[in-house]
Image (cartoon, rainbow, N blue to C red):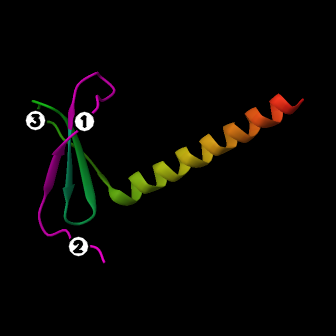
Amino acid sequence: MATELTKEVRRKSSGLGINRRQYMVTLAPGDTIGFRDLRTRKTFWTSLAACYAMAVRQEVAFEKSQKAKAKKEMR
């Protein structure tokens, strides 16, 4: 059973973002997620559905590339 999100939850990343800086992730009610570089004010918001769709596309592309790589090695 999952807990309903009723208030914002913020966490600092353990890794580095695309510009080699740590970033903050904010989960907000209404199925939204925000990302911002640490020590900056600008937050980039998107829906959790968009993040889910992107993750699925990325995984499918990875699996497809692995199959192509295995097929190429068999030749």
Residue 2 magenta-highlighted: yes
Q: Quadrant of the C terminus?
A: top right
Q: Secondary structure at mark 3?
A: loop
Q: Position of residue 47 (x, y in %)?
A: 32, 56
- The residue at which mark 3 appears reads as 41
Q: Position of residue 55 (x, y in %)?
A: 47, 49
Spatial CA distance of label 2 from label 3 is 28 Å
Q: Secondary structure at mark 2?
A: loop
- The residue at which mark 2 appears reads as 3
Highlighted range, magenta: 1-23
| Dominant secondary structure, magenta | loop
- Of the numbered discs 3 and 1, the one sitting upstream in the chain is 1
The relative height of residue 20 versus residue 22 in the rendered view (above or below) is above
- Taking the image as shown, residue 15 lies to the left or right of residue 26, namely right
Please state which amino acid type lies under the numbered disc 3: Arg
- Name the residue: 52% across, 53% down: 56
Please state which amino acid type lies under the numbered disc 1: Ser
- The residue at which mark 1 appears reads as 14
Question: Which mark's residue is nearer the viewer, 2 or 3?
Answer: 2
Q: Locate residue 74: give its quadrant.
A: top right
Q: Secondary structure at mark 1?
A: loop
